[in-house]
């Protein structure tokens, strides 16, 4: 705990005002962070069509999401320390090349097993940009400013999931599901070109020179900081519910409530609008209220929304609206949870922002593996398994955020 405090004081970021960074930098960072969602959101409306084409059941197709999360979670643990040692831009470029290759292989897949495997490769490439974009935000800003910058970036990156299902539904109708993955190849290539305009945020004198074998020890040291864990798991539980939502809503909306795939994108987009509005509000409220208080309030909203969703799903209250309204509230809470939980964790060890970002991301997306996997494992043709997972995750997120009150976790 003392070491973390000394590090914060001894190694302030080079810049502290996110408004001082050009929109070009924010746009590229936002795009990199958007790879976490666009890689999945774009093909969500095509999941039933992919299942039919590859002769797979709903549970197996939902594992294409879980497989992606496995690669995304584990891959971050490698990219974070690499970014701390060699800088941010080169690892991101390598990751984008790997992402494009994996996307092309998904487009050519002829079985659900191959699709799951190549989704893992796609994710390992995509996560380089996500984990190091977060680290770059911490390179540029202190804790509260970093939370504001992350909220701004998440508002930008929310365009990806907002348009993803809508665009994916149209591509599916016009050219089939394989064209969606070819579109991802193009997006990865364009982002790689745009990366050349991004400055390196980690100068050579601030790079770590740890031996490769010390990486595991470094992660173990980070895991001893209980406040870092409280921030991390507040976000991790929420992510479990969020990916249960991503995995479960195609079946719940399209199959159970017979929503056309094109209109599914509209329902999905409504939730993203909620995230964008909450992120905008979060960035404005942080100077007045503080990121940790906003985090606790966001987790309370998530817990209440999850409980309402579980009750409506179990009892059949309200039909489609009874499902969609609490889901909107739960997803919207992301605007107060994700940026603040990440910024809080990064504030503990700013000189190891890459490793902390990787650990946070691995745990949070690892919980997404569990959340989406549980929806697939207990799929029964109704929205109930998804609703139950979301409710439990909302409560878990709230309990972790509330633990930040405890004196033993104080800064």
Image (cartoon, rainbow, N blue to C red):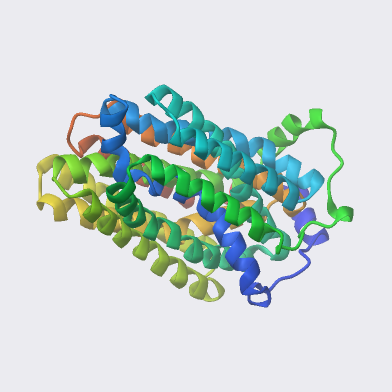
Residue 103 placement (x, y as % from top left)? 51, 39
The C terminus sits in image quarter: bottom right
- What's the residue at 56%, 50% (across, down)? 188
Left or right side of 187 for 306: left
* 21 shown above or below 334: below
Residue with the most extreme front position: 175
- 374 and 101: which one is in front? 101
Which image quarter: residue 12? bottom right
* 60 shown above or below 385: above
- 124 and 14: which one is in front? 124
- 182 and 392: which one is in front? 182
Residue 350 in view here: yes
Which image quarter: residue 59? top left
- 308 and 265: which one is in front? 265
* 137 shown above or below 173: below
- What's the residue at 61%, 67% (across, down)? 26
Q: How many marks?
A: 0
Left or right side of 178 for 53: left
Residue 193 placement (x, y as % from top left)? 65, 57
Left or right side of 204 for 68: left
Residue 349 in view here: no
Left or right side of 224 for 319: left
Which image quarter: residue 375? top left
- What's the residue at 74%, 36% (across, down)? 218
Residue 16 placement (x, y as % from top left)? 71, 71
Residue 41 placement (x, y as % from top left)? 39, 48
* 343 shown above or below 278: above
């Amino acid at each position: 705990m003392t070491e973390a405090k000394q590090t914060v004081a001894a190694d302030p970021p080079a810049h502290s005002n996110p408004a001082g960074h050009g929109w070009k930098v924010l746009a590229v960072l936002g795009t990199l962070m958007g790879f976490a969602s666009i890689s999945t959101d774009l093909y969500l409306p095509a999941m039933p069509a992919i299942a039919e084409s590859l002769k797979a059941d709903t549970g197996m197709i939902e594992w294409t999401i879980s497989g992606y999360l496995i690669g995304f979670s584990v891959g971050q643990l490698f990219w974070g320390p690499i970014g701390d040692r060699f800088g941010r831009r080169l690892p991101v470029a390598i990751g984008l090349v790997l992402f494009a290759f994996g996307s092309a292989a998904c487009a050519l897949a002829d079985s659900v097993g191959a699709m799951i495997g190549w989704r893992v490769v796609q994710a390992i490439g995509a996560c380089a940009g996500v984990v190091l974009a977060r680290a770059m935000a911490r390179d540029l800003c202190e804790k509260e400013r970093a939370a504001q910058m992350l909220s701004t970036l998440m508002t930008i990156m929310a365009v990806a999931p907002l348009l993803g299902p809508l665009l994916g539904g149209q591509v599916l109708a016009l050219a089939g599901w394989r064209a969606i993955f070819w579109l991802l190849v193009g997006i990865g290539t364009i982002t790689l070109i745009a990366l050349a305009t991004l400055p390196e945020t980690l100068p050579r004198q601030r790079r770590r020179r740890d031996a490769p074998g010390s990486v595991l020890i470094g992660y173990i040291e980070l895991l001893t900081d209980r406040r870092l864990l409280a921030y991390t798991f507040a976000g991790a539980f929420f992510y479990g519910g969020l990916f249960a939502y991503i995995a479960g809503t195609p079946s719940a909306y399209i199959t159970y409530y017979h929503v056309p795939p094109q209109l599914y994108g509209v329902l999905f987009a409504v939730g993203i609008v909620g995230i964008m509005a909450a992120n905008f509000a979060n960035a404005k409220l942080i100077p007045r209220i503080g990121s940790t208080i906003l985090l606790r309030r966001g987790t309370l909203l998530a817990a209440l929304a999850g409980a309402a969703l579980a009750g409506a799903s179990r009892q059949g209250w309200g039909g489609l609206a009874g499902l969609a309204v609490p889901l909107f509230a739960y997803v919207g809470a992301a605007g107060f949870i994700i940026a603040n939980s990440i910024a809080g964790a990064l504030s503990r060890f700013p000189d190891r922002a890459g490793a902390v970002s990787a650990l946070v991301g691995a745990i949070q997306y690892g919980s997404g593996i569990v959340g989406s996997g549980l929806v697939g494992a207990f799929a029964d043709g109704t929205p109930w398994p998804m609703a139950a997972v979301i409710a439990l995750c909302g409560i878990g997120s709230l309990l972790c955020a509330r633990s930040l009150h405890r004196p033993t976790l104080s800064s």
